[in-house]
């Protein structure tokens, strides 16, 4: 839709939600709502709960800007509802959102596309597990299959830590992953209009880029532009773009990579609804690498809102 068309519509900014990332979503949504108002749009902030369908009807929302993170917002659930209600929305569709959110299925897609991933094993709640049977050595990364913002993630360096890490991850999901720890630089690729627009390197003060580092000022150094050799930089951008497209994502995303000293670009995950807070990475990439201010970025994302089915 054109800017002129969108300014005749009522825009619902969907925020909050029911996931473990609710507080982050409230911040993202508030920033997006403020930006849309500043640009002259008729936008309303809507805190998503289980009566969201009725709220959308009551508010007469005509286009949805999804600023949700985690379950029920980033996993295809809200996208399916919006498709059913014939309300165009920002971001990826039902299938791409669901696959990107589920780290197990995402890995299968990345493998099929020829992308590099960390070796992993899937564990299911209630199944017997022999730690000595892992096909790769410690250290390992233990994570839930369907959480974002590093919720429930542990780096395990000693066998004695493994059980507690598994219990933490199983607290969020019935399926978890144990991945081989890959030592590398944490490089995030920004995608807009389905193409890579730039990259940023994260150097966390904690052991890895965990929840605290992501949402606490001063807990991570952001390096943009990244200090990579030109050929490796192009490879990282191409890898991020390929991961986005392999899942069938739409519009925008942020792809998390580990870039090793050997020049491998290991895909960790694709975030179909990346953070839009003051500390968020996609807005910083857009500003420093593509010259897009926050309000312009929000407007660009809104402009590609659509129905996908």
Image (tube, rainbow, N blue to C red):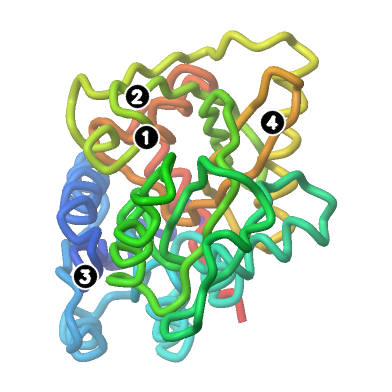
- Contact check, label 2 and label 1, Cβ < 8 Å: yes
Instruction: State the image quarter where residue 168 is shown.
Output: bottom left
Task: Name the foreground residue: 78 vs 179.
Answer: 179
Task: Name the foreground residue: 106 vs 280.
Answer: 106
Q: Classify 10 Å Cα crowding around label 1: few (below 14), some (14-19), many (20 and above).
A: some
Q: Classify 10 Å Cα crowding around label 4: few (below 14), some (14-19), many (20 and above).
A: many
Q: Secondary structure at mark 4?
A: helix
- Contact check, label 2 and label 3, Cβ < 8 Å: no
Mark 3 or mark 4, earlier in chain: 3
Mark 4 or mark 2, earlier in chain: 2
| Residue visible at 56% across and 51% down in the picture | 269
Q: Secondary structure at mark 1?
A: loop
Residue at the disc numbered 2: 204
Q: Is residue 64 visible?
A: no
Mark 2 or mark 1, earlier in chain: 2
* 24 over 15 or under it: above or below: above
Mark 1 to mark 3: distance in Å? 23 Å
Q: Is residue 9 left or right of residue 198?
A: left
Residue 283: horizontal and vertical position, in percent?
A: 39, 32
Mark 1 or mark 4, earlier in chain: 1
Task: Name the foreground residue: 241 vs 57.
Answer: 241
Q: Is residue 67 left or right of residue 139?
A: left
Q: Classify 10 Å Cα crowding around label 2: few (below 14), some (14-19), many (20 and above).
A: some
Residue at the disc numbered 3: 17
Residue at the disc numbered 1: 209
């Amino acid at each position: 839709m054109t800017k002129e068309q969108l300014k005749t519509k009522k825009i619902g900014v969907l925020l909050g939600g029911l996931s473990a990332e609710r507080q982050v979503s409230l911040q993202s949504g508030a920033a997006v709502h403020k930006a849309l108002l500043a640009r002259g749009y008729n936008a309303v902030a809507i805190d998503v709960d289980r009566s969201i369908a009725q709220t959308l009807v009551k508010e007469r929302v005509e286009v949805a800007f999804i600023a949700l993170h985690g379950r029920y917002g980033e996993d295809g659930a809200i996208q399916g509802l919006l498709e059913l209600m014939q309300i165009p929305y920002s971001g990826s569709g039902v299938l791409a959102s669901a696959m990107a959110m589920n780290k197990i299925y995402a890995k299968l897609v990345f493998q099929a596309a020829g992308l590099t991933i960390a070796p992993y094993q899937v564990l299911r709640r209630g199944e017997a597990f022999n730690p000595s049977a892992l096909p790769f050595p410690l250290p390992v990364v233990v994570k839930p299959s369907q959480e974002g913002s590093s919720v429930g993630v542990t780096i395990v360096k000693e066998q004695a830590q493994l059980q507690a890490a598994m219990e933490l991850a199983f607290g969020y999901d019935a399926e978890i992953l144990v991945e081989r720890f890959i030592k590398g630089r944490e490089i995030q690729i920004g995608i807009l209009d389905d193409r890579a627009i730039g990259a940023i390197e994260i150097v966390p003060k904690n052991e890895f880029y965990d929840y605290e580092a992501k949402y606490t000022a001063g807990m991570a150094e952001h390096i943009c532009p990244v200090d990579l050799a030109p050929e490796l930089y192009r490879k990282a951008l191409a890898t991020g773009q390929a991961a986005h497209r392999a899942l069938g994502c739409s519009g925008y995303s942020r792809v998390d990579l580990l870039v090793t000293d050997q020049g491998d670009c290991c895909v960790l995950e694709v975030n179909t609804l990346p953070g839009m807070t003051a500390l968020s990475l996609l807005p910083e990439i857009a500003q420093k690498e593509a010259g897009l201010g926050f309000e312009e970025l929000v407007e660009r994302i809104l402009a590609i809102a659509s129905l996908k089915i």
